[in-house]
Amino acid sequence: MSELAVGNADTDEEEHPHPWPHIESMFTLVKVRKNSYIMRCLLCLPKQTDISAFKNSTSNLRKHVARIHPNKLAKYTDLLENHRKLDATAAGGAANETYKRLSRSAFAKCHALWNKTSRSTMAHETVERECKLQFLRPNQTRWSSLFLAVERIVRIHREQGEQAIRNVCTALKIKM
């Protein structure tokens, strides 16, 4: 029975790593409660000061540093800012790059369609024949013009199908 308890204690330790590893140099995890963490301030050593922090907020830790260790507040703030910057680039880096690539590709095709149809009457007639609607060309003076122009392409795709857009792109020699 005691071996089982020891095994659970070890598992419990592994289940709860430091919730905010970026401030591990200032606070260690002591205990996990239902909605909060009990953190021990390493700056207060040898005195053992435990601070309760909600699982979704480090504000109590920040308040402790501001009140008791005001000279360390800048370091604490830097650690948080660096962590936020790392999270923004590391977590969303690959997804962000994929989004950028797809977005640029889609908008390049849209711009090619808008340019060809606005400069050529033959292209304009091809769109009207295939899609039963005309493309709206975005302009600089209306804040919603890009949205409305993309919305029109989506509407044509929804009502006439992908084949209509594909036929227009083929006729206008725009890569799909």
Image (cartoon, rainbow, N blue to C red):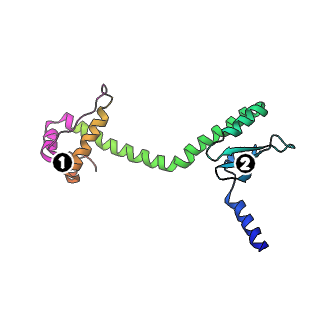
- Is 6 rendered above or below residue 84? below
Front-lying residue, 120 or 73: 73
Where is residue 11 shown, x and y percent of the image? 70, 65
Q: In the shown orientation, is residue 63 left or right of residue 111?
A: right
- Asked if residue 127 is among those painted magenta in the image, a careful observer would answer yes
Q: Earlier in the sequence, mark 1 or mark 2?
A: 2
Identify the residue at image location x=20%, y=53%: 163
Where is residue 65 shown, x and y percent of the image? 74, 35
* Magenta region: 117-142
Where is residue 84 shown, x and y percent of the image? 60, 41
Residue 46: name its quadrant.
top right
Identify the residue at image location x=65%, y=53%: 34
For the N terminus, give its image quadrant.
bottom right
Count neighbours of disc 1 (C-alpha within 10 A) and say few if under 14, some if 14 to 19, many if 20 or more.
few
Q: Which is closer to the viewer, label 1 or label 2?
A: 2
Residue 48 visible to an observer of this rendering: yes
Q: Amino acid at mark 1?
A: Ala
For the residues labelled 1 and 2, the Cα–Cα distance comes to 67 Å
Identify the residue at image location x=74%, y=69%: 7
Point out the residue furthest to the right here: 46
Front-lying residue, 44 or 127: 44
Q: Secondary structure at mark 1?
A: helix
- Is 95 rendered above or below residue 69? below
Q: In the shown orientation, is residue 50 left or right of residue 94?
A: right
Residue that label 2 marks: 38
- Mark linked to residue 129: none
Q: Amino acid at mark 2?
A: Ile
Residue that label 1 marks: 171
Where is residue 49 shown, x and y percent of the image? 80, 43
